[in-house]
Amino acid sequence: MFLWQTEEYDPSASEQRKWTTQQRRQRRSAGPAARYQLEWFRLGEPGHLKLGDVLIQVTDNWIHPPAVVHSEAVTIPRSRSAVAHFLRTRIDLELIALREAEKALTDLGHRNPRLRTDHRIISPTLRAALLRLWNL
């Protein structure tokens, strides 16, 4: 599980083309509405994320629900070493205010969860506490 500081990013035209060619085509039934959506996540350098990793993104004052890395690294054309991944996220989970998340984790015994820095979350209790924020 990884925690990553992110910011809003508008992909270039070449990135958008790459995204559409890499997106998996899946047959859809006429059943209930989808519970997941795919997001494009760009990294400045390769090698951090692997297929199946869980990623929690933090933007400004919000912590996003956990997302699962759904693809291998896709190289981005005309960039030095940037890569992108598809992330699969549940659409029924809401953003949580960063201060509320820090308070909830402190109440659960995690005094310094380091929600404002990029890092890999190794502690099983912190992983469980973070997932518990969304009742997962």
Image (cartoon, helix red, strand yellow):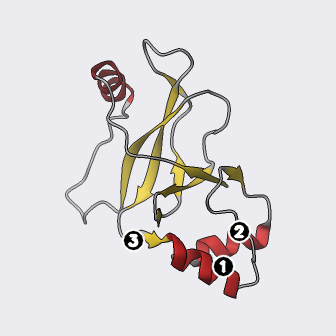
Q: Which residue is mark 3?
A: 94
* Residue in front for this viewpoint, 79 or 25: 79
Spot the residue most to the bottom. 107
Residue 47, located in which quarter of the rendered image?
top right
Residue at the (58%, 50%) spot, across then down: 4
**Kind of residue sitting beneath label 1:** Leu
Query: Of label 3 and label 2, which has the lower sequence position?
Result: 3
Residue at the (24%, 53%) spot, across then down: 29
Q: Secondary structure at mark 1?
A: helix
Dot 1 crowding, Cα within 10 Å, few <14, some 14–19, many 20+: some
Viewer-side label of 3, 2: 2
Dot 2 crowding, Cα within 10 Å, few <14, some 14–19, many 20+: some
Q: Which residue is mark 1?
A: 105
Q: Which residue is mark 2?
A: 113
The C terminus lies in which quarter of the figure? bottom right
* Residue in front for this viewpoint, 41 or 117: 117
